[in-house]
Image (cartoon, helix red, strand yellow):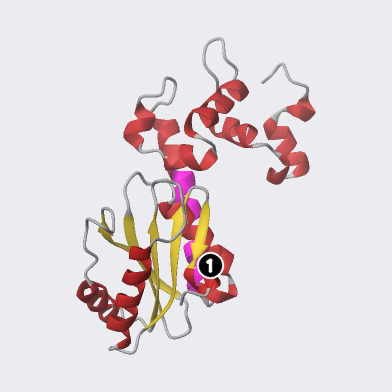
Amino acid sequence: MKDLPAELRPREKLLAHGAAALADAELLALLLRTGLPGQGVLLWAQALLDRFGGVAGLLHAGLAELKGIKGLGPAKRAELAAVLELSRRVLATQLAQRPVFDRPQAVKDYLKLRLAELPHEVFAVLFLDAQHRLIACEEMFRGTLAQTSVHPREVVRRTLELNAAAVILAHNHPSGVGEPSRADELLTSTLRSALGLVDVRVLDHIVVAREGVVSFSERGLM
């Protein structure tokens, strides 16, 4: 990167124009700092993004998967994992401070960071207080919804333990297709009925996939 004019170097460009002015490869290059023998850091950064299908794929890659990448030592793997976790925590803090429907896009962004790149299906619940602020987001079950039962009694029990007044249901589609299935709709109906018995509202069911996020509420399915 020293061969580049100063105004084109990622660090100088960021300081002069802000982080939004940098391409994904330039931001990643700042984290990586050094390239490989015969491959500058910018080219290496772009190669990593291409290999993992973009920033989200790289940041969601497991530490074991990253361990097999030449040049990604423990320090760099830890930094990539830390960036993702910091992003999650920032969004979670925002959702805990204000009603979630003041920031519907933040809910989607938060769930996408948590679920979109997982290789297995996860069913999660966002537990909300009476003002619809986030208390906790917990993964309740793993496995495809067709093969792993989502037990309503467990969701109800945890809701009561956290003294939640409302919930948002969420799960991911590892296939990458976010379109809700008939099984998703039936599950939503079952959980709404079970939670309604203890006066807890189901505000939404969000399906997360790489290609996008689908809200049952926005689709008029709630």
Pinpoint residue 13: horizontal percent, then vertical percent. 74, 35
Residue ID at (35%, 32%): 65
In the picture of the structure, the residue carrying the numbered disc 1 is 94
On whether residue 55 falls in the magenta region, the answer is no
Q: Nearer the viewer, residue 161 or 201?
A: 201
In the depicted structure, whether residue 153 falls above or below residue 58:
below
Q: Which residues are magenta?
A: 82-96
In the depicted structure, whether residue 81 falls above or below residue 109:
above
Residue 1 in sight from this viewpoint: yes
Can you name the residue that lies furthest to the top here? Answer: 38
Pinpoint residue 184: horizontal percent, then vertical percent. 36, 65
On whether residue 89 falls in the magenta region, the answer is yes
- Packing grade of label 1 (10 A; few <14, some 14-19, many >=20) is some
Residue ID at (33%, 71%): 186
In the depicted structure, whether residue 215 falls above or below residue 101:
above
The answer to whether 179 appears left or right of 14 in the picture is left
Residue ID at (39%, 52%): 173
Query: In which quadrant of the rendered image does the N terminus lie?
Result: top right
Magenta residues, dominant SS class: helix
The answer to whether 190 appears left or right of 168 in the picture is left
Q: Nearer the viewer, residue 51 or 73?
A: 51
Residue 90 in sight from this viewpoint: no
Pinpoint residue 182: horizontal percent, then vertical percent. 37, 64
